[in-house]
Amino acid sequence: MKPARRPIADTTWLAGQILVAMPGMTDPRFAQSVVFICAHTAEGAMGLVLNRPLRRPEFAEVLEQLGIGPLPPARPLRMGAGGPVDSGRGFVLHSSDWSVSDSMAVDDHYSLTASLDVLRAIAAGGGPEQAFLAMGYAGWESNQLDREILDNAWLSVPADAAIVYDADVKTKWTRALAKLRVNPAMLSAAAGRA
């Protein structure tokens, strides 16, 4: 018997949430990862891994490749590997205090922009107050993420700006779990259902 689908009105329930990989995550690309969910619909889900820093390129190198100035930029921008899909494309997750016509509002606090406008604004010293540039993204097909959650691969927690934007990537996983008052040592890799 096929599991019932949630009505369309309820399918955005994970947008604006953070997923925290459980210890039993077998996919090495997502082990101990923290993922901000940008969209979650009946067609699938899209998110950005927050705790996989990029050593290269640096923000100034990206701007130089794209012909965006000034160089060096007036503001730095933290960058990371957002996921295994489309890793040559950049996505800027940012505070909702700034947007352009191409920006997608995730919720009242977060927006996503994939156009060069946001990079130009940040390089010039403007743009959103807080931002993170992810190269690539994590994607799930219809109902795939729901199944992974039922299989005990992920926990979800409310997003907060410190976990989303700060540069302390080594502690993001444990800090995200702490929001749920969960000690990582007490987590089991095995799923169970009553």
Image (cartoon, rainbow, N blue to C red):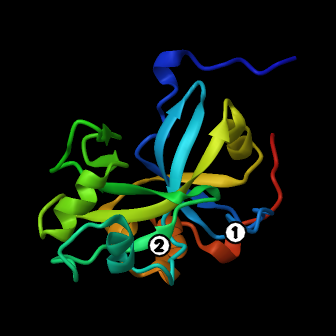
Mark 2, residue position: 175
**Amino acid carrying mark 1 in the image:** Ala
- The C terminus sits in image quarter: top right
Please, is residue 192 above or below residue 4 in the view? below
Position in image of residue 131 (x %, y %): 29, 63
Could you tell me if residue 11 is visible in this image?
yes
Seen in the image, is 114 located left or right of residue 120?
A: right
Give the structural element (helix, strand or loop) at label 2. Answer: helix
Seen in the image, is 126 located left or right of residue 28?
A: left
Question: Gap between marks 2 and 1, in whole Å?
Answer: 15 Å
Give the structural element (helix, strand or loop) at label 1. Answer: loop
Seen in the image, is 118 located left or right of residue 191?
A: left
Mark 1, residue position: 31
Please, is residue 10 above or below residue 141 in the view? above
Q: Which mark is residue 168?
A: none
Position in image of residue 90 (x %, y %): 44, 58
In this view of the protein, which residue sits in the foreground, 136 or 188?
Answer: 136
Q: Residue at x 41, y 81 (%)?
A: 168
Seen in the image, is 153 located left or right of residue 76?
A: right
Q: Earlier in the sequence, mark 2 or mark 1?
A: 1
Identity of the residue furthest to the right in this view: 1
**Amino acid carrying mark 2 in the image:** Arg
Position in image of residue 170 (x %, y %): 51, 82
Q: Residue at x 19, y 76 (%)?
A: 75
In this view of the protein, which residue sits in the foreground, 97 or 88?
Answer: 88
Please, is residue 58 above or below residue 8 in the view? below
